[in-house]
Amino acid sequence: MSEIINSKGLIELISEKLPEFSKKQIAELLKAEEEAVIESIAKGHTIRRVGYLTIKVMKRKATTGRNPQTGEKLEIAEKMIAKAKTGKLLEEAADEFYASA
């Protein structure tokens, strides 16, 4: 099974690749990127990092669900969601991981 890397671990990995930057600078950069992505999605923009990741806003249609405890039918309202699609580089990395497992 794969390891889960949190923000601290990601900062550590980046600091190994970019030793000229402090961990604090890297953390600030990641926070700024997170804020920029959230602000862009809130405006309905699509984020596209070619080969890596695409995040876009989509409408999820209203549907009828069911309460699993009571069996009662529920109307689930239409909702706007952020949907992420991996790019070729991420897909190839995942294939490489599972091929070696």
Image (cartoon, rainbow, N blue to C red):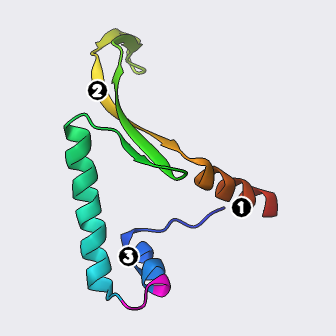
Q: Which of 73 and 23 lies nearest the eye of the viewer?
A: 23
Q: Check the image and report above or below for 57 versus 27.
A: above
Which mark lies nearer to you, 2 or 3?
2
Among the two numbered marks 3 and 1 on one chain, the one whose residue lies closer to the N terminus: 3
Q: Position of residue 37 (x, y in %)?
A: 28, 51
Q: Secondary structure at mark 3?
A: helix
Q: Residues within 10 Å of mark 1 (few under 14, many from 20)?
A: few
| Residue at which label 2 appears | 80
Q: Identify the residue at image location x=32%, y=85%.
A: 23
Among the two numbered marks 2 and 1 on one chain, the one whose residue lies closer to the N terminus: 2
Q: Residues within 10 Å of mark 2 (few under 14, many from 20)?
A: few
| Residue at which label 1 appears | 97
Going by the numbered disc 3, the residue's amino acid type is: Lys
Main SS class of the magenta portion in the image: loop
Compute the Cα span from label 2 to label 3. Answer: 30 Å
Q: Residues within 10 Å of mark 3 (few under 14, many from 20)?
A: few
Q: Identify the residue at image location x=38%, y=76%.
A: 8
In contact (CB < 8 Å): disc 2 and disc 1:
no
Q: Quadrant of residue 56?
A: top left
Would you say residue 30 sits in the magenta stretch? no
For the record, the magenta segment spans 16-20
Q: Position of residue 78 (x, y in %)?
A: 28, 16
Going by the numbered disc 2, the residue's amino acid type is: Met
Among the two numbered marks 2 and 3 on one chain, the one whose residue lies closer to the N terminus: 3
Q: Quadrant of the N terminus?
A: bottom right
Q: Label for residue 8?
A: 3
Going by the numbered disc 1, the residue's amino acid type is: Phe
Q: Identify the residue at image location x=44%, y=43%.
A: 54
On screen, residue 52 versus residue 36, left or right, reads: right
